[in-house]
Image (cartoon, rainbow, N blue to C red):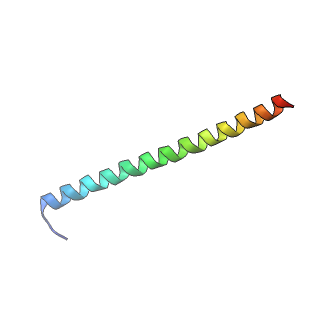
Amino acid sequence: MPESPAFWLLFAGYTILWLVIGGYVFTLNRRQRDLERELDLLRDQLRSSGE
């Protein structure tokens, strides 16, 4: 492993970037699941009100 301070700064920067991207993808996934649940509830309500 290189002992250069620039290497470790670059490594830290990329690590932080990947953590941020991972958190964003996780948040998007959770929001999508919540929206799908809400859509299912709305579909059920529409079906039951149409009967």
Q: In the image, is 14 to the left or to the right of 44?
A: left
Residue shown at 87% from the left, 31% from the top? 51
**What residue is rendered at 65% in x and 36% in y?**
38
Residue ranking furthest to the front: 50
Say whether residue 38 is left or right of residue 24.
Answer: right
Query: Which image quarter is the N terminus in?
Result: bottom left
Residue 25, x across and y down, in percent: 45, 49
Front position in the image: 3 or 23? 23
Q: How many marks?
A: 0
On screen, residue 31 above or below 12: above
- Residue 12 at x, y = what percent? 25, 55
Q: Is residue 49 above or below residue 33?
A: above
Q: Residue at x 27, y 55 (%)?
A: 14
Q: Position of residue 15 (x, y in %)?
A: 30, 55
Hey, which residue is sitting farthest right in the picture? 51
In the figure, residue 10 lies in which quadrant?
A: bottom left
Q: Quadrant of residue 41?
A: top right
